[in-house]
Image (cartoon, grey):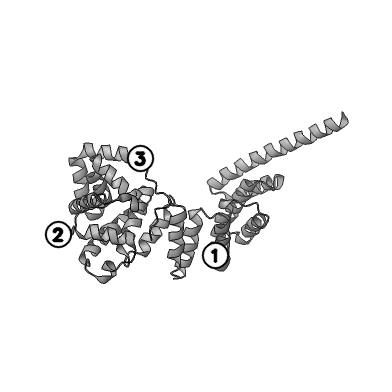
Amino acid sequence: MKKFIFILLISMAQNGYAQDAKRLHEMGKNYMIDGDYSNAESLLNDAYNLDTNNIIFVKDLALCLYFEKEYKRGIKLLSNKIDAGMADDQTFQIAGTIYRANQQLIEAENLYLKAIKKFPGNGAFYNEIGELLSSQKNNQCIDFWERGIELDPIYARNYFNACKYYENTELIWSIIYGETYVNLDPLNQKTPEIKDILLNNYKAYFADLLNEKYIKEKNKFIQKVLSKLSKQFDIVAEKGITTATLTMIRTKFILEWFKDKPEKYPFKLFDMHLKLLREGMFESYNQWIFGSAENLSAFQGWTQLHSQEYFEFMQYFKTNSFKPVKDEFYH
């Protein structure tokens, strides 16, 4: 009986500590949101001391230390959990952010490599190490961005960086990655930048259509893309590259693409184009991508003139999220 009472008291005490820790943690987070990092740190540290194994408490305290530029303390806190095998993916991400803020780039790279080994399907780590290498002018960055695209195809940022990387070299891949990005992250403040790149890449591609760097592309998937796209050169020669002509070019491209056996190179982006064509929304979609990049006032005029169909497209777009899938990586 005494043993039972003792265990009950211990359990009640532990529950009390847990509730106190949770309350302190919530208060600390509120202070951190308000930018009062000093009070936030004090409360988050108290919560952590009551429950040192709670990884949420660890992450929020480390994040607060990052905001306070207490980098060494933040790294020490997180490293202990990483070395003990207690870290989740966010723990690695916060640690990498602190390493980079403290200019410990070698340590950050090693950390990301360790994170990739532990979380091979997490696209964020491939993006982070890619950006780290890119900041050092290391062209291996693209290998990590594309590996991230291959293993975690719905993570958007790798497409953004790959699009930018290939902007002046492999135009078709820049177009594919860029269009995928704007569909995955349409509300991001960087999306207009990618729309500009897409329009300029189409102009550059058709201006340099007969250059060997395109004709002799070794990748079979891209060879097929080029063969279908090059058939539309007459439209460009006659009318140039505008939102309207791109709609025509891309419509004919998709119809040509699906004349062949699409199962050889199944591709969600092209599947979506075909679906939008069938739904009568492909023109609105192309206006959404290229219209504002070409001429904002003309685009606004088009949306006013076609208000109902553009509204229907936007409603459809909001409820039919685009999701690339694995096994459709052809680079």
**In the figure, 11 relative to 269: above or below?**
above
Q: What is the x, y in percent for residue 84?
A: 68, 55
Q: Amino acid at mark 2?
A: Asp
CA–CA distance between discs 3 and 1? 37 Å
Q: Which residue is under mark 3?
A: 320
CA–CA distance between discs 2 and 1? 48 Å
Residue 285 or residue 18, whichever sits in front:
285
Residue 231 in which image quadrant: bottom left
Which of label 2 and label 1 is nearer to you?
A: 2
Extreme residue toward the left, this view: 238
Name the N-terminal-most of marks 3 and 1. Answer: 1
Which element is circle 1 on?
A: helix
Which of label 3 and label 1 is nearer to you?
A: 3
Q: Identify the residue shown where x is 50% and y is 62%.
A: 129
Which element is circle 2 on?
A: helix
Please tell me how crowded label 3 is: few (under 14), some (14-19), or many (20+) other residues with Cα within 10 Å: few
Quadrant occupied by the N terminus: top right
Q: Identify the residue shown where x is 72% and y is 39%.
A: 17
Q: What is the x, y in percent for residue 270?
A: 30, 49
Name the N-terminal-most of marks 2 and 1. Answer: 1
Do the CB atoms of the residues marked 3 and 1 lie less than 8 Å apart?
no
Q: Amino acid at mark 3?
A: Asn
Do the CB atoms of the residues marked 2 and 1 lie less than 8 Å apart?
no
Q: What is the x, y in percent for residue 128?
A: 49, 59
Quadrant occupied by the C terminus: bottom left
Q: Identify the residue shown where x is 67% and y is 41%.
A: 21
Q: Which residue is under mark 1?
A: 109
Q: Which residue is under mark 2?
A: 234
Q: Amino acid at mark 1?
A: Glu
Q: What is the x, y in percent for residue 306?
A: 19, 40
